[in-house]
Amino acid sequence: MPYSDKYWQKEEILPRRELEEIQLKRLKWVAKHAYENVPFYRKAFKEKGVHPDDIRTLDDVARLPFTNKNHLIENYPFGLFAVPKDEIVRIHTSSGTTGKPKVVGYTARDLENWINLCARCLYMVGIRKKDVFQNMVSYTLFTGGLGFHYAAERIGAMVVPSGTGNTKRQIQFMLDFGTTAIHCTPSYALHIKEVAESMNIDPSEIGLRIGCFGAEPWSESLRRKLEDSFGLKAYDSYGLSEMNGPGVAFECEEQNGLHIWIDHYLVEVVDPESGEVLSEGEKGELVLTPLTKEALPLIRYRTGDITYIMDDECSCGRTHPKIHRILGRTDDMLIVRGINIFPSQIEHVLMKIPEVGDSYQIVLTKRGALDEMTVRVEVKDEFFTGELADLERLKKKIENALREELGIRVNVELVEKGTLERFEGKAKRILDLRR
Amino acid sequence: MPYSDKYWQKEEILPRRELEEIQLKRLKWVAKHAYENVPFYRKAFKEKGVHPDDIRTLDDVARLPFTNKNHLIENYPFGLFAVPKDEIVRIHTSSGTTGKPKVVGYTARDLENWINLCARCLYMVGIRKKDVFQNMVSYTLFTGGLGFHYAAERIGAMVVPSGTGNTKRQIQFMLDFGTTAIHCTPSYALHIKEVAESMNIDPSEIGLRIGCFGAEPWSESLRRKLEDSFGLKAYDSYGLSEMNGPGVAFECEEQNGLHIWIDHYLVEVVDPESGEVLSEGEKGELVLTPLTKEALPLIRYRTGDITYIMDDECSCGRTHPKIHRILGRTDDMLIVRGINIFPSQIEHVLMKIPEVGDSYQIVLTKRGALDEMTVRVEVKDEFFTGELADLERLKKKIENALREELGIRVNVELVEKGTLERFEGKAKRILDLRR
């Protein structure tokens, strides 16, 4: 049962001071839980010369050791679990195409918390009992599918667990079932738009009200494009399997930053190099400590995601702080001729140029000792006139816009619509041929 | 919480008389529910000259109209739903490769009933909190995946929602996670055996205790082969999406017939041609009336599955009658030179012959006006010696065994292991080239 017409749980609007009291109590619990039940943490705490009893304030979290994805992989499969195996009711894994995946586990209570956190997100953007929610991401081991599936079902929406693939059938189902809300990657949403158009269906006639998009970074300009095409409101979803999955942070109707549920996740932003804690507003790596996870209490987990905390009051009434949409990944960051570049910056520039189509690719090569960056850009059909002078002008326009944003020279190569590979999961847009 | 160490719910062992009282009460409810809320049924009842109030005994079910899969398809997508759309929390569809699929819906209470019915089945064969349950069927729109997923989770087993495909990784997960119970099609289980052997892993060393196999008909001989290879106990699972999905009937540890949960499904067996109700022990088409389904109360649904009721007391203590494992489908039944043949009969013969490998195919052709049946059979490597005389002897042996079982002459063609296509879902073993 929802707490009210507007909020799924009452914790969403607790005064910040109360939230912080909850956080401190839970931080003490989780540190003790990890220390007592996971040999890895007992050792790591001892090496840092810290004991769970040393936690007196929330700032004391900075005294605890970090966890990173290699620790998970080195302890594959269950080495960081803090409960006996028979208390685990669910396993998920990272997609890890090569080598050992990251394995995460859940107790029944972890699942219950996770369902409610995901339901907070979906309810926040207006998904209700009357909605038809088509969940177009991979089910099975990926957390994105089952995570929102359970949550939408809990809210009482009609869940269409259609998974990935067969885009024409997905569109047919939307029309036949009266789908009002969708969940997929933003690149798949763009693909749906293209396929609908190829079927002579105007995407805005499908009847979608709400789009929940996650699992890859995307831009404000892509949001506008999706909203304009489908006539929906598009919301950014953030999560990672190490923190249950989706449901860590999500945009509210303001669409300006993602509320992060601090009664379940303690948030820090650190310098990715030094690990030093940064202040509100400073960009750095998001570090999360789950405060309620029984199965897998990962202390100060290095997410690898770059963002910053935007802690101002929100008109939606929720008291949980917001993070800026993810700017990039510490390991996605491209260093080109010594300059740090996030692919999202490039996407942002491209999406502002009306002639640019729905797909692009970044190719990095070496010319002698120097890095060369080429951006391959699809041009919309109506602008692909075959007039060389027009194309040359467009190429120059994009090159100038990119140089202005990035501070370095970039080559642009224009290609016809449909030339570049489409992705149903996370888009792979970077081709680094420098080694 | 389970009812006891042995039974998931107390309804499993209610005296038959009490079960029948429940059935009658529920039959009256479901007939009324369908009549009042589904125009299709109001019309069909009127055409049969029957009214829900006419139901006084369980035998009165025979006065009600049948439903078949075409009725579902003609009323695509929601025409047979008996509740408003906003009460539906889940949609599943049949795989329907061409044309419109069958769409089924669930209220929150339907889901709750379904989870418990599936949990009865898994608990019946010994799956407990301590087990690791690897669910190797398709998730998303197919009912088999989510159906048992929720149930195993409810029991508290560690659920590995690994879905289909990537067999080597499936086997690696079994070893790494300590999987003790699996759910998949029997043909996929055979495929796992072959892949494990190709990885130099003895299937019996994997540690599996329990195999739940469904979604296609299989034989006693295949059961023995799977049990011997993996060192597990193999159980037959029966269900169909029109009756929620899996969890309609399931074998108990006796492995002699499938208990069908008659407090939720009223069972009849009818003559597939005349529709006349047959007696206990007589083979015919299974007809089910769901007694508790709110969303989709399909009255006297023609399953198309051929079986019979084996209503003797069971040593397991459950009071629900058993049906024989499915003998075939009314629409699978092959008519070859005027003789009715079920593919399961052929499988049964083949699996008893030690030289026969893991796959076979039935090819039907015409020679002039006459039907010709050829069975292509994979021979185990160790018997594929290249000695023509040996192969000829084996061919004759299989041909004789098939003629004895089927009463008609059959050609056998021997092929090497690995020649025939493998299937991860339902096996497609019949190639009918007669038209």
Image: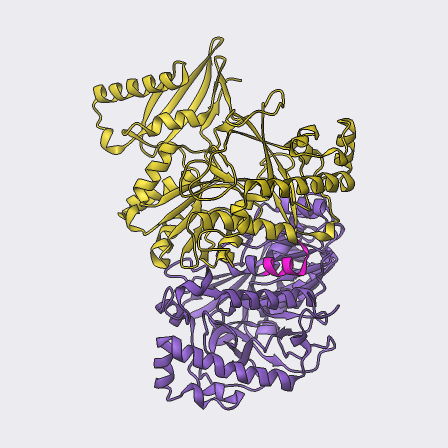
Chain colours: A purple, B yellow
Where residue A92 sits in the image (x, y, percent)?
47, 60
Residue A314: horizontal and vertical position, in percent?
A: 71, 78
Give the answer, above or below, for where B428 lies relative to A317: above
- Above or below for B192 versus A182: above
Residue A362 to residue A71: above or below: above
Q: Nearer the viewer, residue A183 or A193?
A: A183
Tell whether position A154 is magenta: yes
Marker count (numbered): 0
Q: Quadrant of residue B254?
A: top left
Residue A420 lies in the magenta-colored region: no
Q: Is residue B264 left or right of residue A106?
A: right
User: Who's the residue at 36% across and 76% down the image?
Assistant: A40
* Residue A349 makes an appearance in the image: no
- Please report the residue visible at 36 percent of the width from the left and 19 percent of the height from the top: B402
Residue A73 in view (yes/no): yes
Q: Quadrant of residue A10?
A: bottom right
Instruction: Please tell me which residue lies in front, B324 or B206.
Output: B324
| Residue extending furthest toward the top | B368
Residue nearest the observer in this picture, A415 or B370: B370
Q: Compared to B400, does A351 lie above or below? A: below
Which residues lie in the magenta part? A148-159
Instruction: Residue at 48%, 44% (x, y): give it.
Output: B318
Where does residue B217 sit, x and y in percent of width and height?
46, 33
**Is residue A72 left or right of B307 when viewed as pictured?**
left
- Quadrant of the snapshot with the C terminus of chain A: bottom left
Q: Position of residue A362 (x, y in %)?
A: 52, 62
Secondary structure mainly formed by the magenta segment: helix
Quadrant of the image containing the N terminus of chain A: bottom right
